[in-house]
Image: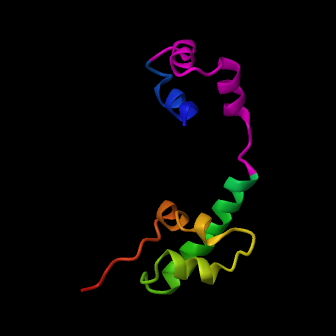
Amino acid sequence: MKFVVIAKHRATWPVAWLCDALGVSRSGFHARLNRSPSARSRSDEELGGKMKASFMASDRTYGAHCSSAVARYPTVSVKAQVPLPRRCGAIAQVRR
């Protein structure tokens, strides 16, 4: 989270000052910029795509637990899958 703040504000403030203020090293920040996405973020992106497709196929009615059951991704727990629909924009609307 600290690196995100630094990346967001580095056009306004010097990177060295931001890193000192947040207590991180400059080399750590620059290493983070050049690092490829983690295996978890890649799998979350793949699962998010499956959940979005399931959500759209259900006429945008199913919530997080139904979408995660449809995705059938056994290596990720339901607890880890629940925030994914919100991140990929698959949030069910209540019809009244």
Residue shown at the point (69%, 25%) measured from the top left:
28
> Looking at the image, is 46 positioned above or below residue 24?
below
7 and 75: which is toward the camera: 75
Residue 26 percent coordinates (x, y): 65, 18
In the figure, 31 relative to 81: above or below?
above
Q: How is the image coloured?
A: rainbow
The percent coordinates of residue 27 (x first, y second) are: 70, 20
Question: Image quadrant for the C terminus?
Answer: bottom left
Count of numbered labels shown in the rendering: 0
Q: Position of residue 1 (x, y in %)?
A: 54, 37
Q: Position of residue 87 (x, y in %)?
A: 50, 60
The magenta region covers: 13-38
Q: Is residue 37 magenta?
A: yes
Query: With 94 as the anchor, is 60 left or right in this view?
Result: right
Magenta stretch: residue 34 in it?
Answer: yes
Question: Against 86, is 51 above or below?
Answer: below
Q: Is residue 38 above or below residue 14?
A: below
Residue 32: quarter of image: top right
Residue found farthest to the left: 96
